[in-house]
Image (spheres, coloured by chain):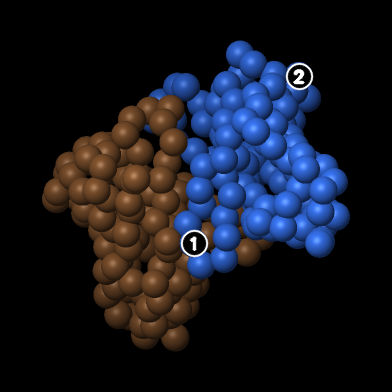
Chain colours: A blue, B brown
Amino acid sequence: DQQVKQNSPSLSVQEGRISILNCDYTNSMFDYFLWYKKYPAEGPTFLISISSIKDKNEDGRFTVFLNKSAKHLSLHIVPSQPGDSAVYFCAASAKVGNEKLTFGTGTRLTIIP
Amino acid sequence: DVKVTQSSRYLVKRTGEKVFLECVQDMDHENMFWYRQDPGLGLRLIYFSYDVKMKEKGDIPEGYSVSREKKERFSLILESASTNQTSMYLCASRTGMRETQYFGPGTRLLVL
């Protein structure tokens, strides 16, 4: 049962344009969401997070949007740069219990120069 | 800078061997985690630990055990390796609830 889903395994975007990565979740107890970025042969690194009390969080070129009613979040990267080519994982946690992270399956983003 | 290190980057073992994967963090973090990453399945939690000598099962603990004798070290043990345990294993740590998890570089394990 995949509680966090990233339905696009891959995405290609022209350098300078906007990259939009999507994530859907099914567990209504999730109230904290994160995006991680992973380069080959490296561990994931934290990118940006959002709490369910917000619907948007911005950090430089990265913005995460949360639509609670649709159980959907998205990561926008503007403008996209070649160094953004990586696999992006969204993750979610619930305040109850141990707050472990549940990860999506990942989206491979390729920025075309 | 938080540093999470894993004992090996690549490991090749035979079916039935006992395998130890070691993880060390240098930031005095309470919580440590072991995940495996497989294509199309993302990161799945195997075990985690809130404190020394404490452990909890994650989503896929079967075939694995863990040990946390010291705060900075969290070991993943494959009691009898099988080919379906061929995977990328990632260790992570965090200081407390709702805090960012920091990941090690991963160990790519091949079981023949």
Which sits earlier in the primary sequence, circle 2 or circle 1? 1
Secondary structure, mark 1, is loop
Locate the N terminus of chain A and report the quarter of the image it occupies. top right
Callout 2 touching callout 1 (CB < 8 Å): no
Mark 1 Cα-neighbour bin, 10 Å: few <14, some 14–19, many ≥20? some
Q: Residue B105's x, y, as percent?
A: 42, 61
Query: Pointer 1: what residue?
Result: A42
Compared with A66, B26 (above or below) is below
Q: Residue A7's x, y, as percent?
A: 77, 48
Distance between mark 2 and mark 1 Cα atoms: 35 Å
Residue sitting at x 53%, y 60%? B37
- Side of B51 relative to A73 (left or right): left
Residue sitting at x 62%, y 31%? A59
> Closer to the camera, A82 or B61?
A82
Query: Pointer 2: what residue?
Result: A69
Locate the C terminus of chain A and report the quarter of the image it occupies. bottom right
Q: Label 2 amino acid?
A: Ser
Mark 2 Cα-neighbour bin, 10 Å: few <14, some 14–19, many ≥20? few
